Structures are given as structure tokens and as C-alpha cells.
Amino acid sequence: MTLFSKHIRFWICFISAGIFLPLGAKAYRFLSMQRELQNAALPSLPAHTVTLLETSHGNNLTRQMTIIYARRADGSTVRVNRMADSFSRTGETENKAIRLATGVYINSYSDVNMKNTRIRDANDQMVKGHALAQADPTSNCTKNFSGTTTLLIPAKYQGMDTVEGYPALKTITETGGSLWTDWCAPAFGCDIVKHHVDFNDGGYSDQIATQLEPGEPDPALFDVANMQEASPLKIATASAQLHHRTVSDRLLPNIMETEKKYQRLKPQNP
């Protein structure tokens, strides 16, 4: 005696196929993407340094910050945010986000003289995927090296403009009621060389280039050798104590997610 009739067995097979075939197709596409990333050559972008002065106006306050984007010929990048800070030993705070071509990521915070390091293999899909997601200068910064759009939020392209004598793609994006205008220069790896935003509360902010330098950046921009290795939670707690406050409940979930990632990818002998 058979357990199921032919009719029932047919429907079991039909339903199973409906469930597992799409999963198999997704798995195949995922593996194909992994192979493509594994075999893809890392894109080459020009070495450069972009220095911007950001001035923000709002709530009867005016704040300034220096922003630096730098890229080495080997593909390593750093973003530096530098601002006045009366609690810091030097009177300013400098935060760095370093992404080395070898797969090492470093975030540093000068106010507490600490850094955290995460290590991935240079052939890790995430490392290669980030590289291929970079804007391609040959497309005038409208597409990334994977051939898709560089914009997560639909923007209105305004065509090529000029910033400090360099061609730059101008885009306008509306998000959350605020209007963002960016200029990205192919000569500088499609980094932003000018920026303006009108916030929905009436405030506004500008980033103006103070220096655009082709060629290898200053090695000091990547130097964090004298900083203490610490977890993201320890750094956030130390910075909050220095500034006489507590870690924000709003930021704590994000900090804890970063903490988990750090514990998984931290150096074994920091």
C-alpha cells in the first residue's frame, strides 16, 4: 500500500518545486556573483587629496569642520573629519576612517587617542565588492565599476560643471525634505569637491574645496600607530566621559552592532 496516491505525490512535488527551485536560482546567482567578484580585477583610481571646509548654519549656530578625502595609488583610502573641541588635549578632535587595500579597516579618534581595527582578507567579497561599487571616472561619475548607477537615492543630473578648474558632475538630490547638491570630480576619483545642502528646517551647509592635490597623499594621513587599540564600545564610553555626558540611547544599538563586528574581525595581537 502506497503512503500517498499519485495525485497527492504530484502536488507534493509541484509545491516542493515551487519552493526550492527559486531558492536554487537565488543560490546560483549568489555563487555566480561571488565568482565574478573573485575573478574581477580591482579598479584603478587616481591618487589624490581633497580638502574641504564645511560650514554649517542652523539653530543660531555656525559650525566649521575640515574634511579630507585621500587615496593612495594602491587603492587605500582615508576620510578625516577635523573640528574644534575644547575638551581635547590639542583643542581639536580628528576622526579618521581608513580603508587599506589589504582589507584592513581602521577607525581612529584623537580626543581619546584610541582606534579600532578590523581585518578582512584582500580577496574577501566585501572588500572587492566595495571597490567595484566605486564610481568610475570614465563614466563622468554616473556609473560604478560594476556598470550600475552610483546613486542609492534618485538624483537629477545637471551635467558637467567646473570646480577649481576641474570638470565635476553636478547632481541634485531631494531626501527628507532637504535638497542636496554635490559636485564630483573624475580627476579625483569621483570624490566630492563641492557640496551644498538646504535643510528642511531652514538651515544650510556648504563644503568648499580649500585644496585639490593630484598625486600621492601625505603618509601622515594614514598614521595611527601611536593610538591604543580598543573596542567601539570602550571608545564611545571614553569619549562620552571626556565630554561629560553618557552614551546616547539612540546610538547605543548601532554601537553594539559595531562591537559585534569588531569582536569577530579584530586583530589577534593588537
Image: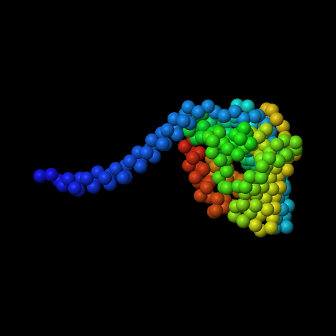
The x and y percentages for residue 26 are: 45, 46
Q: Residue at x 17, y 53 (%)?
A: 3
The answer to whether residue 59 of the structure is visible from this angle is: yes
Quarter-of-image position of residue 50? top right
- In terms of depth relative to the viewer, which is nearer, 8 or 131? 8
Judged from this view, the residue extending furthest toward the front is 159
User: Quarter of the image holding residue 117?
Assistant: top right
Residue 189, horizontal then vertical, whole percent: 74, 39
Looking at the picture, how far across and down is residue 192, in whole percent? 77, 47
In the image, taking residue 113 as reference, residue 15 lies left or right, namely left
The answer to whether 13 appears left or right of 42 in the picture is left
Q: Nearer the viewer, residue 221 or 129?
A: 129
What residue is at 70 percent from the left and 46 percent from the top?
142
Q: Quadrant of residue 99?
A: top right
Residue closest to the far left: 1
Question: What residue is drawn where x is 84% and y is 37%?
Answer: 213
Residue drawn 67% across the image and 47% down it: 150
Q: Is residue 129 above or below residue 12?
A: above
Number of numbered callouts drawn: 0
Determine whether, in the image, residue 19 is placed left or right of residue 133.
left
For the C terminus, the quadrant is top right
The answer to whether residue 270 of the structure is visible from this angle is no
Residue 184, x across and y down, in percent: 77, 46
Rendered view: 218 above or below 206: above
Q: Nearer the viewer, residue 4 or 123?
A: 4
Q: How is the image coloured?
A: rainbow
* Residue 104 higher or lower than 95, as above or below: above
Q: In this image, 195 relative to 115: left or right?
A: right
